[in-house]
Image (cartoon, rainbow, N blue to C red):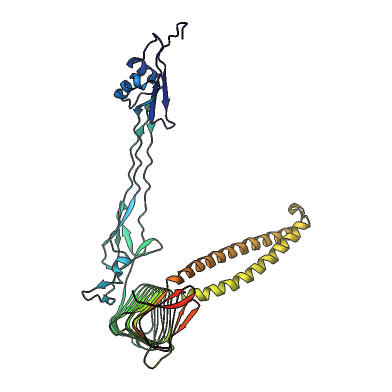
């Protein structure tokens, strides 16, 4: 500035931290001071290494009098476009898609054709791998290249009895069988099919995959599958265990010595004098009679003659039937609100935790004794050092075990919160002799009740109308 208070315009160039934008701020000249020209502005940008993405219309805008003293963006870099990650496209329907129940025009649910098994032929494409893209580099306002992140690749989930092509782009079935996903791998299991009954001509059957029996499983025999079991006849006094679901087109009369257990669902036409255990749902079309049924999900009897009479029915969420009990006041026990296996496990975990906590206290006491004596690890015998190391390992292991137990207890307690959503539905009638239990609360039916729904309300079993 001179003595006559004249001053030229000043130009400030500012850049964002990532150098993707440049701004200009021009001060107003004083008196007869020099006004900023376009050439001045370009020289200032160049002096500050700004040479890419310059918008000349913005330069002219910055030089206008009304914008003096304002910060105007004049250059914009091109951001990098990161590559897309690779992905997998599965060419077969998921278990949920296959098992979606079909409903006819009358509203009847078809639980007979659940399509538990999805067969494929050798050479069938199972999975396609879409490779990642490299992305596109960008440029900041100084002309410096900005690198793009390359997309992450994925690996084809090749499991048993599958093969990839040379470029690892496609996964195919090697054999004819049932496709499944286990431990994040796609595998094809050959389905074991028995044309007749399970009897003396076949002996007991144990198979790692899925089993299809076109006849019945006769009394005294065992069928064990790592996957699903489909029986097109009956189960008669047999032991049937599946790592997946069990579907029986006929009925189940397993008897006292028999057992039908599935990690997933069990479905059948009827159940009589049997013991059933399902990790998820038990779906019966006609009747459950004098049987012990445990379900980690729900128990439903849904035919026009749907009946539950006698025995004990335990489910985590819901029991539904048209009729519960009988005119003869047959004792029928219905329990919902807690997964039956969770109830037993919860009690055992608390017992185990008490024992381990006591053992941990003892280990902690012994370690404190060492600490109080002021022993220097470097000055003790190898034998004592080894004993101390062993003690520390035991202490660490015991704490980890207690932590795992506490996590499991917390999970079970969170599951118990579902008790308020548990319910028992009698779509037509409940007879005297039926005992309803939701959680720890009990309701004994002494009179005939029609169109009933039992729920837990403020800690008590309440009778409500069906909605």
Depth check: 436 or 180 in front? 436
- 235 to 459, vertically: above or below: below
Q: Residue 378's spot in the image, x, y percent?
A: 74, 52
Quadrant housing residue 248: bottom left
Depth check: 217 or 18 in front? 18
Quadrant housing residue 59: top left
Q: Residue 88's spot in the image, x, y percent?
A: 32, 54
- 213 to 46, vertically: above or below: below
In the displayed structure image, the side of residue 169 where residue 275 appears, left or right: right
Residue furthest toward the bottom? 328
Can the viewer see residue 177? no
Can the viewer see residue 276? yes
In the displayed structure image, the side of residue 282 where residue 417 appears, left or right: right
Query: The C terminus is located in which quarter?
Result: bottom left
Residue furthest toward the right? 373
Q: Residue 40's spot in the image, x, y percent?
A: 36, 15
Quadrant housing residue 97: bottom left
In the displayed structure image, the side of residue 319 where residue 166 appears, left or right: left
Q: Residue 96's spot in the image, x, y percent?
A: 32, 66
Instruction: Identify the residue shown where x is 67% and y is 69%.
Output: 358
Instruction: Identify the residue shown where x is 48% and y is 81%.
Output: 442
- 237 to 441, vertically: above or below: below
Depth check: 209 or 87 in front? 87
Instruction: Identify the residue shown where x is 45% and y is 73%.
Output: 457
- 348 to 19, vertically: above or below: below
């Amino acid at each position: 500035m001179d003595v006559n208070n004249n001053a030229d315009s000043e130009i400030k160039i500012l850049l964002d931290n990532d150098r993707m934008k440049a701004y200009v701020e021009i001060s107003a000249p004083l008196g007869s001071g020099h006004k900023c020209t376009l050439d001045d502005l370009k020289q200032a940008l160049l002096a500050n290494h700004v040479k890419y993405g310059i918008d000349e219309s913005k330069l002219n805008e910055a030089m206008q009098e009304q914008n003096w003293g304002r910060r105007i963006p004049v250059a914009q870099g091109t951001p990098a476009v990161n590559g897309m990650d690779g992905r997998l496209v599965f060419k077969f329907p998921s278990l949920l898609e296959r098992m979606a129940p079909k409903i006819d025009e009358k509203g009847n649910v078809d639980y007979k054709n659940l399509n538990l098994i999805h067969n494929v032929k050798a050479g069938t494409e199972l999975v396609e791998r879409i490779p990642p893209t490299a992305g596109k580099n960008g440029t900041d306002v100084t002309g410096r290249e900005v690198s793009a992140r390359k997309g992450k690749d994925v690996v084809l989930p090749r499991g048993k009895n599958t093969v990839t092509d040379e470029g690892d782009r496609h996964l195919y079935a090697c054999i004819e069988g049932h496709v499944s996903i286990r431990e994040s791998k796609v595998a094809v299991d050959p389905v074991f099919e028995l044309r007749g009954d399970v009897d003396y001509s076949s002996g007991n059957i144990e198979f790692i995959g899925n089993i299809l029996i076109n006849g019945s499983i006769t009394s005294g025999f065992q069928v064990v599958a790592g996957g699903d079991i489909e029986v097109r006849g009956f189960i008669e006094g047999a032991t049937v265990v599946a790592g997946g679901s069990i579907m029986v087109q006929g009925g189940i009369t397993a008897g006292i010595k028999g057992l039908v257990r599935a990690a997933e669902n069990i479905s059948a036409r009827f159940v009589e004098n049997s013991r059933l255990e399902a990790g998820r749902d038990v779906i019966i079309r006609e009747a459950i009679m004098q049987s012990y049924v445990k379900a980690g999900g729900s128990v439903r009897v849904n035919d026009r003659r749907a009946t539950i009479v006698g025995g004990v029915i335990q489910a985590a969420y819901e029991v539904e039937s048209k009729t519960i009990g009988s005119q003869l006041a047959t004792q029928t026990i219905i329990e919902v609100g807690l997964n039956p296996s969770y109830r037993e496990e919860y009690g055992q975990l608390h017992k185990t935790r008490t024992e381990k906590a006591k053992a941990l206290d003892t280990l902690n006491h012994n370690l404190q004794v060492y600490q109080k004596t002021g022993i220097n690890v470097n000055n003790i015998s190898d034998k004592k050092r080894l004993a101390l190391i062993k003690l520390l390992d035991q202490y660490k292991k015991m704490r980890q075990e207690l932590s795992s137990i506490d996590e499991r207890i917390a999970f079970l307690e969170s599951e118990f919160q579902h008790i308020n959503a548990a319910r028992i539905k009698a779509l037509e009638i409940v007879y005297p002799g039926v005992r309803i239990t939701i959680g720890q609360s009990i309701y004994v039916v002494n009179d005939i009740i029609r169109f009933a729904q039992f729920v837990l309300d403020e800690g008590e079993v309440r009778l409500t109308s069906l909605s």
